[in-house]
Amino acid sequence: MSQTTPEPGGTPPAGTATGFSLAAVERFLMAASMGVLCLLTMANVLVRYFTDISFAFTEEISVALLVVMTLVGASHAFATRHHIAITFLVDKRPALAALAHRFGLVCGLLMFGLLAGYGVLMAWDDYSFEVTSPSLGVPQWWYTVWLPVLSILIVLRLLAQLIQRGEH
């Protein structure tokens, strides 16, 4: 893992502003959403076991947390190059590695760009038609707005990688 804090008397690591790292924020968000998800699920299991009553609203929150955790995790994986890569063709022809990597980045840009665009439309529909969530009755756009926002974060991460690859 890369260091995110400067050495005493030193300068902040490259790619950070005064030691601030988007990767650190992503790791915190992933851990926090997983922690809240575990606590909600455990509370629901315990309440159901001891009282035969279920907290139905926890499923709604859990799904939203899973979406956030998945998209933040995907952003972090792309940025740190820990995403899933199918390397069969590249292993057979190593000369194709750079081209295959760029092709994968462009495909990711296309997919997450479309996801962001359709996510904006979905969130806007939820907002304009005043759709409420089934269990809690809160505005549905509170949940759906995170799909385009986090998809745009992934697009920015992929663009940064494309730009970095172009400089090398």
Image (cartoon, helix red, strand yellow):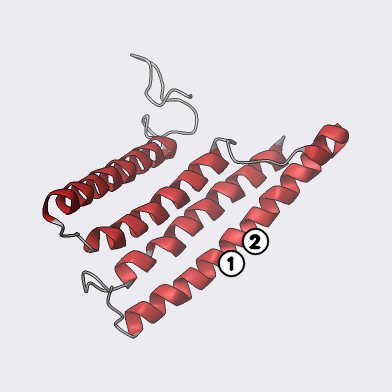
Q: Is residue 23 above or below residue 141?
A: above
Q: Is residue 107 above or below residue 161?
A: below
CB-based contact (under 8 Å), mark 1 and mark 2: yes
Give the residue number, with chain letter if any, for mark 1: 114
- The front one of 26 and 4 is 26
Q: Residue at x 75, y 38 (%)?
A: 87
Amino acid type for the residue under numbered disc 1: Leu
* Label 2 element class: helix
Q: CA distance from mark 1 to mark 2?
A: 6 Å
Q: Residue furthest bottom?
A: 129
Quadrant of residue 161 within the rendered picture? top right
Mark 1: give few (<14), some (14-19) or many (20+) Cα within 10 Å.
some
Percent position (x, y) of residue 99?
Answer: 80, 44
Q: Residue at x 29, y 82 (%)?
A: 130
Q: How many marks?
A: 2
Q: Residue at x 87, y 34 (%)?
A: 92
- The front one of 137 and 26 is 137
Quadrant of residue 10 within the rendered picture? top left
Q: Is residue 10 left or right of residue 54?
A: right
Q: Which mark, residue 91?
A: none
Mark 2: give few (<14), some (14-19) or many (20+) Cα within 10 Å.
few
Q: Which mark, residue 110?
A: 2
* Label 1 element class: helix
Q: Is residue 166 above or below residue 119?
A: above
Amino acid type for the residue under numbered disc 2: Leu
Percent position (x, y) of residue 5?
Answer: 37, 24
Q: Is residue 158 left or right of residue 120?
A: right
- The front one of 11 and 154 is 154
Q: Is residue 47 left or right of residue 81?
A: left
The C terminus is located in which quarter?
top right
- The front one of 54 and 130 is 54
Percent position (x, y) of residue 98?
Answer: 78, 39
